[in-house]
Image (cartoon, grey):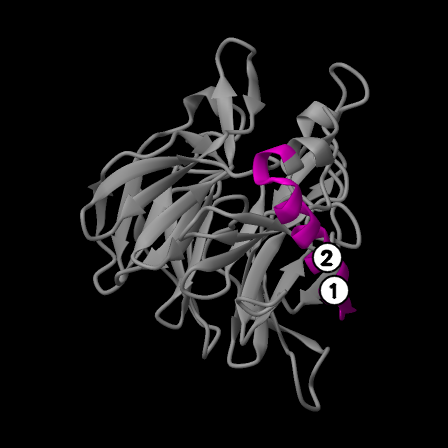
Amino acid sequence: MNRRVAIAGRWGAGAWCAAVHAVAAAAPWTAETPLPRGLAGHAAAVHEGRLIIAGGSHWSGETKRIENAVHRRALRGADAGRWETLAPLPAGFAHSASAVGAGTLWLAGGTTDAIQRLDLATGAARQIGALPERRTYAGAAFAADAVWIVGGTPTDTDFSAARATMLRIDAGTGAVTPAPAGPAWINPVVLALGDELHVLPGSLWSAVRRQLEAPRETWIFSLAARQWTRRPLAADLPRGLAGVALDRYRAVLVGGLRPEQAGTAGGPAPISREVWLYDGRTGALQPQPPLPAPRLAAAFAGEDGNVWLTGGEDRIRGRTDTVWRWMPPAEGAP
């Protein structure tokens, strides 16, 4: 079925036409000063007008290299566009759980069990503890004075070992405690919206087909009730999205993989340029202007109504240094 027809059928013709009009009217993505090098699977944050990049991976021949470098640049003023290198992370980090909260960029796992925190004001990083086991391809969000880690696997070569566990890291003490189990997904997007955690695709291992597939639902965790509920997605999304919360209820989702669009059976899945606005109150998904190019495993950060998408893959094993900025439409804008 044509993808436009499929979404129109799910939303209704009027809603689809309104969404197309909104895409046409929305602001485009703007290129900014590139990263010091091409990276994927890194973490990003924006703090007081400065963009911070930590960790990431790149390929050297047939070997994937895990970075511990930290870079920062001003977004405004005389130093805008100039990257500076800060002290490195105590341990390498890539393709795992990161979250921003309490003036800190939190990093957990990434081929190790290390829990690291990077002070966004000073740039100082330190290891504060360890997870119960190694964890890669996990997702995380900061809410209720804690970092919540969802999914992932102990090894980056076995997706079937994805964990349904959720872990809570106390922001004050660094103590790690188990929380009610959630989805056993690879690379979930975890968003703190309202008084809930919203977990979106993500990839789900299919034991029957022996491959990763895109889940068709959102898992929602109530921080007050400490219970999970599920909600069907309003539209089919790529798997392996990047996402960032805009405000208390809305988020931006971008990129990912579209396996069902592969032209050759068994060939690599195409990387997506899609951009969506997600409303956590209703589950609505509104398409937005696409990315300038396909992206996977990019790092996303936001501040003051703007979002920055940094690096990522434009092809399998490809690494880009691009930095794109976008101003999403205000809530209620046509």
Nearer the observer, 61 or 266: 266
Q: Horizontal and vertical percent for residue 305?
A: 56, 73
Q: What residue range appears in magenta? A: 9-34
Q: Is residue 63 left or right of residue 97?
A: right
Using residue 326 as the reference point, say whether residue 174 is left or right of it.
Answer: left
Q: Position of residue 216 (x, y in %)?
A: 50, 30
Q: Tell me: residue 318, above or below residue 85.
A: above
Residue found at x 66% / y 41%: 13
Residue located at (65% from left, 79% from top): 75
**Judging from the image, what secondary structure is the residue with disc 2 in?**
helix
Say which residue label 2 marks. 21
Quarter holding residue 29: bottom right
- Where 167 sits versus 74, above or below? above
Outermost residue toward the front in this view: 14
Residue drawn at point x = 46 percent, y = 78 percent: 122
Amino acid beneath label 1: Ala
Q: Position of residue 162 (x, y in %)?
A: 42, 27
Marks 2 and 1: CB-CB under 8 Å? yes
**Is residue 15 in the magenta section?**
yes
Q: Is residue 160 magenta?
A: no
Graded by Cα atoms within 10 Å as few (under 14), some (14 to 19) or many (20 or more), the crowding at tag 1 reads some
